[in-house]
Amino acid sequence: MFFKKIIILIVGVLFTLSSYSQEKFTLSGVITDIKNNETLIGVNVYIPEIKSSTTTNEYGFYSITLPAATYTVLISYIGFQIESQKIELSENKKMNFSLSESGEILKEVIITDTNPRSAIRSPEMSLNKLSISAIKKMPVVLGEVDVLKSLLLLPGVTNAGEGASGFNVRGGGADQNLILLDEATIFNSSHVFGFFSVFNPDAIKDLKLYKGGIPANFGGRVSSVLDIYQKDGSSKGFHMNGGIGLISSRLLLEGPLVKDKGSFLIGGRSSYAHLFLKLSEDQKNNSAYFYDLNTKMSYKLNPNNNLFLSGYFGRDVFSLNKSFTNIYGNSILNLRWNHLFSDKLFSNLSLIYSDYYYGLDLDFVGFKWDSGIKNYNIKYDFKNYISDKFKLNYGVNAIYYDFNPGTIRPSNSDSGINFDQLDKKYAFEPSIYISAVQEVSKRLSLSYGLRYSQFYRLGSSTVNIYENDSPLNFNTDLQIYEKATPIGTKFYDKNEVIQSYNNLEPRFSASYQLNDAQAIKASYNRMTQYLQLISNTSSPTPLDVWMPSDNFIKPQIADQVAIGYFRNFKDDSYSLEVETYYKEVKNRLDYIDGADIIANKAIEQIILNGQLRSYGLEIMLRKNEGRLNGWISYTLSKSEQQTPGRTPEESGINGGNWYNSTYDKLHNVAVTGSYNLNEKWSFGANFALQTGQPVSYPNGQYEYLGITVPSYGLRNENRLPTYHHLDISATLTPRKNEGRNWKGEWVFSIYNLYNRKNAASINFRRNDDTGNNEAIKTSIFGMVPAVSYNFKF
């Protein structure tokens, strides 16, 4: 049935192709960086005579079909010189362009985002693109450039505070974000429990965050998509760059495999703060460090075929006196084949492997714990440039999942622990999509599509059977939920379907230009998430377990609508983006009071299906050009969760009423800017302020058998104090860099300039001296100065 749908789709596409006139001609080609032959993503190709445009895809390819005539072709891209060339289009023509960095000509002019006029015309909305050059100018904690930390300066994006992993988008959970590195899924995006991200900025080429209006080729999460591509590597010559910081260093090497045809890239990064622990007698057996490796190879077989092989491997190691050791991290591998069927039809076939591993060795107890998730993914995508006003994308995707909730084994011969394997789980998720971008008129542009996804929870597995199919009972006398006792089990053989789901996910967005500088945009998208993160913390931790949807855990389904106003000022030097949105998520998991998720063999006994809703207003004012550039963003938002009882007799969570979700932040303000004083000095600053995170404080206590037990009120009815900090940086580029192959720079930064003690948590205890209860605030960072040295060769 699934493959029949594929055939029907392809036939429909071919019919569409044949219905268009053949009187026009196509201009196509690849756009690269002149220094290293690196392909450039999202380059704007503009034809001013007829106000028509297109952009390069993820592999630098563009195609535009126009009537026969003489045209001016304008090529513009972030931080690069604008190219202009006259062409006479009387036949299909291939033209490749190579761009030079604008910094080589005029260092004080830096474009930090996409071409503003192109953004006004495009039906894309709720999309943020950040250049790596802009990210590297932002001051960050301990001097380590961080891709994820830069996202927190965007409207609608928050996190759970300092030292918290992941990020939250428009009131959703961190587990609701699809994070992709070269198309492969990253399940844990943080090092050192959230202090740093897994992305080496030197290896990153392009970054896009979709908060809404998500294209149909993406699926599997209900909040956002973070799409990151690694550099291909230079095919013109050997280059080296890196940096040395207080707690970590990095090095990246790139060069040609075959000049102008093939390239390689290899980048490594490692922290060494744990070495300082060895200097202390009390800490010499303790360790806390991370390392990662980025690799990529590309080879051009001929003008129509390219091969890419990319990978990532990262690990975190945390050890206390060798009696407690925690190791976790991601591994990915992706083999891709680009094929150009014609100057209008581009394809990409990807074979992807992704693995997230979590290991725990408790030597003092005598056991080892291993868990993780693997997926095997095949994608085949097509981009069809039918005309200058109509583009079609379509493709298929199939993912096989292998979940290991936990393996327990003795760590030595004296251990009293017996081997135990929590029931492994398997799933298969095929999908198919088609989408179009259409310029209906000079003012109206549309993007619309449909994704059809299926999900099969597979054996081999043993499933509990409950009376009335209910794994939870409600005690009406005590008004609490209690675990139900299974009345039996059922075993499913390997690849036997335990439960299946299928969903249609429509996508739509529109842009209406009021004039060349103003537009109104609107979008709607439905997303389905078949994987659930089992966690009762506000921020994901390495120990959290991913679970597939089954007969007890239903897939999350999100519907989001958004409308916005976009405007450019003063010849595009300034831009304003205003968006308002509303999002609903069905089947959001909630946990009963006292839920224990660690090594739980029957997760269904502690969860309830609820719903999440969020809505808000986002404002972003950006300065795009000049010595001083950056943005100011403000978000006013609300995020609430509701878990009503399954029957009128049940109370649900919080009496079945709406309550603040863990991700609710009413106010979120961010200001970031960079200033180029001259060729030697540049400066940067960030300011962030957000409403404190919702928490539950005890509202009383009682004595039971001589033990003081705290009592709690409604869930998340309290908040941590308001979170804010100011960071600054200064970059010194010595003049002796000019004319030298070796170029270096010093970066001086101060995180939290005014030493704000932001609360990571607040705990309550009884003072032994006074006998009074007291609140203890835990803060992670005060003011943190840092210095690092960056170089390139």
Image: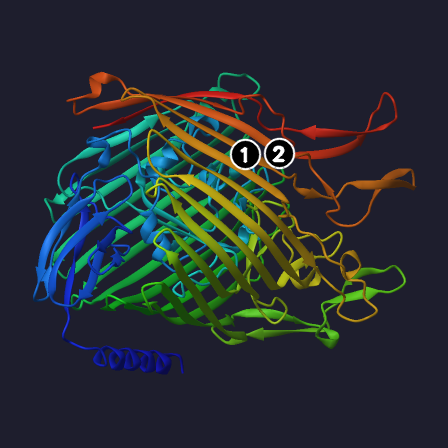
Alpha-carbon distance for marks 1 and 2? 8 Å
Please rate how many residues cluster around mark 1, counting C-alpha atoms within 10 Å: few if below 14, some from 14 to 19, many from 20.
some
Residue 417 in percent (x, y) is at 62, 48
- On screen, residue 724 versus residue 631, left or right, reads right
Residue depicted at x 35% and y 46%: 312
Q: Nearer the viewer, residue 39 or 698?
A: 39
Q: If you read the primary sequence from the N terminus, does the residue marked by circle 1 or circle 2 appear first?
A: 1
- Residue 772 numbered mark, or none: none
Residue 98 in percent (x, y) is at 15, 45
Quarter of the figure that contains the N terminus: bottom left
Q: Secondary structure at mark 2?
A: strand
> Can the viewer see residue 602 in this picture?
no
Residue topped by disc 2: 723
* Circle 2: residue type: Tyr
Quarter of the figure that contains the C terminus: top left
Residue depicted at x 32% and y 53%: 118
- Asked if marks 1 and 2 touch (Cβ < 8 Å), the reply is yes
Residue topped by disc 1: 688
> Can the viewer see residue 181 in this picture?
yes
* Circle 1: residue type: Ala
